[in-house]
Amino acid sequence: MSVAEPATTATSATTGPTAPPAAARRPTARRPAPGVLAAGAWLALVALAALLLPLLPGFDPLHGDFAHPSAAPGPGHWLGTDAAGRDVLQRTVAGARASFAVAGLTIAVGLLGGGALGLAAGWFRGPVDKAIGFATDLLMSVPSLILVMITVALRGPSLTVIGSLIGLFTVPHFTRVVRAVVLSLSERGFVQAARMIGTAPLRILRREVVPHVAPVALTFAFTATTVAIVAEGSLSFLGFGLRPPEPSWGGIIAEGRTTLGSAPWISLAPAAVLCLTVLALNYLGEQLRSKGGRG
Amino acid sequence: MTPAKPPVVPTPEPCPVVLRATGLSVVHRTRSGPLHAVSEVDLTLRERRTLALVGESGSGKSSIAKALLRLPPPTAGTVTVDGTDLAALSPRALRALRPRLQMVFQDPVSSLNPRRTVRDLVAEALDAHPDPAVDRAAVVERQLEAVGLPLALFGDRRPAQLSGGQAQRVAIARALAAEPRVLIADEAVSALDVSAQATVLNLLRRLTEERGLASLFISHDLGVVRAVSDDVAVLQLGRLCEQGPTEEVLAAPAHPYTAALLAAVPEPGRPLGDTGLLPADPPSPLDPPSGCRFRTRCPFADERCAREVPELREVAPGRTVACHRPLLPVAAAQDSAVAQDGAAAQDSKVSGRPSR
């Protein structure tokens, strides 16, 4: 039936993402690109290792094998040992937990805070938008890492404090992303139609706006995750993260940096894992974004 | 609105007034200063009648539609629906009254949430104003039936699975499910191909009659206007320049602008392009010309047109024109105020909400 009316293609072409010709989308939607598969597989591997390996007997990232300090990668220790004879693979896997804990907290704070502020700014506009815009600009002008370091110095190292503070500093970015989507959505016909019918504002937000904002915000969450992982790594590297010997990627890299010449694997193993993880997250986020953030 | 003054002119239309807009003005604040989108427009919509609002792009047609719906409210002027002044209502009361004023948008596909099924889209008004006495499924089926889309076939589709014409009919069914008194169609067929246009136009015509709607049909296409409307109001740069029964206005326009619009309609056997207008760009609503806003393009304009804003004056029963040099003779000593009072007197009879 729709074939009989040429208007179908004409309107769908002008309305963009709302009405893509179904046939044109399918190949990309069904078969993910090899890069997407590889990135996804890597993230799954890291996440599973962080979750499952600590359950194995004999897993102890704090245990030092004093017979083999700074041992090169080999059968007993696949990624070698550090100066205290601790297994670098086990420490890297355990370090992933710190990174993911911080990242998870960051996303939770950023999504909730930025989502709420962005919705409010885009929906109410006017003075509300101005006030929120001012507050987020203010927050963005604060040197975030320094503030986190001061807090950690005063309150002691804690993944909760680090995660929620980094999350706080992603709030302005989430706010901007969400606000922009809400602004453009409120001009869309179906939101106008809901107002015209007399739907209550909260109901419009819940049913018409949020479902369209969520995919975009989640896409941005990938970027925020990488920011959190890098920030946590930097803080730990500088000594403002978890206290040694508790493992975290930045901490292990820092411990190995004095022996980079003689035992490079101590720093390079966690550094490589960190890089690959950030790369995979960025790549997936970029792929999602290029698909228009549709969910 | 005192009924004390008897109508001087017999009202040509016996149909009761549903919506009356008086002195409607819309001014947008822009960086370059105030933009006068609509200036002091009076409109009356009557039951079972379709008023067409025509004018070129940027003449303020859509601004009027939005102002009537208070999305957003007009800068000045009042809109009454069945005697209720919309501006006097609390936000909650306005929301409760909103179903009575429904609009069908120009782009049918984007006016439907792409994630929802046709069934849910049509039920939007019922879900927004829950009423246990209303059978949701039955209403959805009946309204879809009314626009010629069987529920069994279309109920579970999503907007992307509809053609433009079908999507517009779903939008109409959604409007109908709200049991409206007023139906505004804003360029509702412009995005459709000709066969779908005919379907939707016939539908709008039929529904206006059957459901006793008061319809406002906004279009720039005079051919479509001729097919669908009883009366026509011509808008030029935010001001009404001519108003009257569609047949009469299109047969013998009184305003040079209406004549130019008609001349711009392509017809077989007539060379295109000569509208008789002076070769000037349409003036900017940021800085409208003094006096008559059409004078910069009008071949008949003289110095009076630059000095005085022309009032709407009667040229024939039920026909008014705002022009110092109309193409039809103006009836002596009569102006639009008389006709307005006549309509107002009748207006007092119809107040209170008709039953669903």
Image (cartoon, helix red, strand yellow):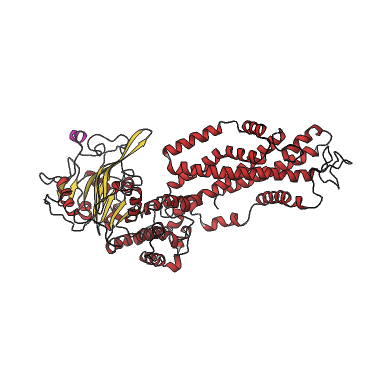
- Against A81, residue A196 (above or below) is below
Residue at the right extreme?
A: A67
Q: Residue at x 37, y 67 (%)?
A: B142
Relative image position of residue A69 (x, y in whole percent):
86, 39
Q: Quadrant of the N terminus of chain A?
A: bottom left
A252 lies above or below B130: above
Residue B270 visible in the shown view: no
Does B300 lie within the magenta span? yes
Compared to residue B68, the image places residue B288 above or below, namely: above
What residue is drawn where x is 41% and y is 60%? B122
Residue A258 occupies quadrant: top right
Q: Is B34 or A136 nearer to us in this picture? A: A136
Q: Position of residue A174 (x, y in %)?
A: 55, 41
One can see residue A67 in this view: yes
Region in magenta: B288-308
In the rendered image of this protein, does residue B347 appear above or below residue B136? above
Residue A171 in which image quadrant:
top right
Q: Quadrant of residue B280?
A: top left
The one nearer the camera, B254 or A276, is A276
Q: Nearer the viewer, residue B199 or A175?
A: A175
Q: Is residue B318 left or right of residue A30?
A: left
Residue in the picture at 57% in, 42% down = A110
The x, y position of residue B204, in whole percent, is 32, 60
Numbered circles on residues, count: 0
The structure residue drawn at horizontal position 63% and vertical position 56%, both measured from the top left corner, is: A31
Q: Main secondary structure of the magenta part?
A: loop
Does the magenta-highlighted stretch encompass residue B226? no
Judging depth in this view, the residue of B149 and A115 nearest the camera is A115
Q: Position of residue B107 (x, y in %)?
A: 40, 52
